[in-house]
Every structure is written in C-alpha cells, then in structure tokens.
Amino acid sequence: QVQPVESGGGLVQAGGSLRLSCAASGRSFNAYAVAWFRQAPGKEREFVAAISWTGDSTRYGDSVKGRFTISRDNAKNTVYLQMNSLKPEDTAVYYCAARPLTIEIAPRAFNYWGQGTAVTVSS
C-alpha cells in the first residue's frame, strides 16, 4: 500500500511562501489521487487541495483559491503544495492523503494518510 510522507513545513511570516512536499513510500503514487488537508487546534480537518492521478484535474478549498497551487511529478513520486501569500489563519498541521484514481474532498474518502507537517504563519 502507498504511504504518504510530508515535508516542508515550518515558520513563516505573513505574506510569505512555503512549499510542502508529499512523497510516496511503499508503492508509487501513480493511479492515486492525492489531496492536502489541514487541521488547526480545536478545529475540524479542512480540505485544502486535490489533484487527479494524471495531474490534469485539480480542486481547491475556497479559503486557499488563488494563493495555493497543487502539482505532482509522477516520475519523482511526489505531490507538491505551493503556498503563497500566507496568512496567520493558514496555521495548521497539513496532511497529505491518497486514494485510488478519482478526486474527492471529504477526508473519509481517503484511504492513506501521512503524519502531517506543521505550518505556522506569524503576523
């Protein structure tokens, strides 16, 4: 089975940028749709972005549209989340998740989850 592994989190000032990476361990990400979710303290897990297994279809949560970009490099078995114009409300633990083939936005639709990477945006 595929095991997502996140990296790239850290501390950044408001208005800054970060790029998160999600690498596949165990087996290839090919034929898996991949999504990013985030969870802030005391809040429910929130959909951020998703990409189809071919990379030709993407979806974004309303709060990140126009600021975040999801992409994938299947040759490197990695999915990226480029985060620009970061705001303090983007502070959360970011999780990468995978499911076979089709994009979904509900956390319960995803079979495989990483451990998360923390992003803190200071004001």
Image (spheres, grey):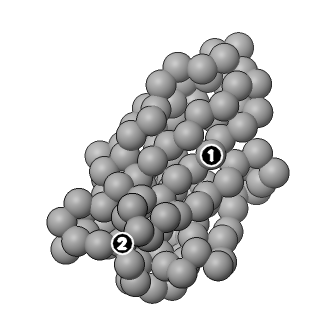
Q: Position of residue 46 (x, y in %)?
A: 56, 53
> How far is the residue under mark 1 from the one under mark 2?
19 Å
Q: Is residue 98 above or below residue 85?
A: below
Q: Is residue 113 left or right of residue 53?
A: left
In the rendered image, which residue does mark 2 sit on?
A: 29
Q: Residue at x 36, y 72 (%)?
A: 29
Q: Earlier in the sequence, mark 1 or mark 2?
A: 2
Residue 68 visible from this viewpoint: yes
Kind of residue at disc 1: Gln
Kind of residue at disc 2: Phe
Q: Position of residue 41 (x, y in %)?
A: 47, 32
Which residue is at the front of the view, 72 or 103?
72
Q: Residue at x 54, y 81 (%)?
A: 54
- Quadrant where the C terminus is found in the figure: top right
Rendered image: mark on residue 49 = none
Label 2, secondary structure: give it.
loop
Q: Position of residue 81 (x, y in %)?
A: 57, 50
In the rendered image, which residue does mark 1 sit on?
A: 82
Q: Is residue 33 left or right of residue 27?
A: right
Q: Residue at x 23, y 60 (%)?
A: 25
Q: Residue at x 31, y 51 (%)?
A: 5
Residue 41 visible from this viewpoint: no
